[in-house]
Amino acid sequence: MPQCRTCRHPDVQAINALLVAGESERIVATQYGLTQASVHRHRQHHIPAALAAAHQAAEAARGDDLLGQLRQHVGELRALFTASCEVLRDARAMGDLDRVLKAVDAAGRAHGHALRHLELLAKLAGELDERPTVNLLVAPEWIAVRTAVLRALEAHPQALEDVRAALRRLNAGG
């Protein structure tokens, strides 16, 4: 089965990195001379497999080309953010509102891209657990109440057994 046009593109790794980081299919297609439909099909059918393979390779070899490229992109985005902040400082000093707005926009975009890249790095490195979690806080007051109720029920064996049975039913989902 022939690969898709996007898979055959010489910059497929850069394209994958952008798509994984959440870049729009339209922007990627325009930037690399592809159709939006081709980029969409590539994202739907090949990116998940590429991510799984990259993750396995990262675990086995403690590093992956995609991971290295993402790290490089994060460094470049940090430099872009720093440069944007310097332009912003200079534009403020000069009172150039147009340059201030452009610098703020550029810094914001660089920051957003860097955050998406860092999130992906954390996922690939296994440092970001997205499974749902439940946090249970047991207040000391509840422990005191529970203890007092159970002690009071010791004098009433049938009531104690009824409460235990009700709690078992509750725990079983009934």
Image (spheres, rainbow, N blue to C red):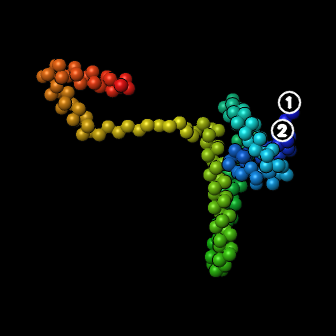
Q: Quadrant of the C terminus?
A: top left
Residue at position x 23%, y 24% in the image: 163
Q: Secondary structure at mark 2?
A: loop
Residue at position x 64%, y 44% in the image: 120
Q: Is residue 111 visible?
A: yes
Estimate how packed mark 1 is, as few (under 14), some (14 to 19) or many (20 or more) residues with alpha carbons within 10 Å.
few
Residue carrying label 2: 4
Q: Residue furthest front?
A: 174
Residue carrying label 1: 1
Q: Quadrant of the N terminus?
A: top right
Label 1 and label 2: CA atoms lie apart by: 9 Å
Horizontal and vertical percent position of residue 146: 23, 32
Q: 13 and 2: which one is in front?
A: 2
Q: Residue furthest bottom?
A: 95
Q: Considering only vertical position in the picture, is 134 above or below 18? A: above
Q: Is residue 62 visible?
A: no
Q: 61 and 152: which one is in front?
A: 152
Left or right of 116 on screen, residue 34: right
Residue at position x 18%, y 32% in the image: 148
Left or right of 155 on screen, residue 122: right
Q: Considering only vertical position in the picture, is 75 above or below 89? A: above
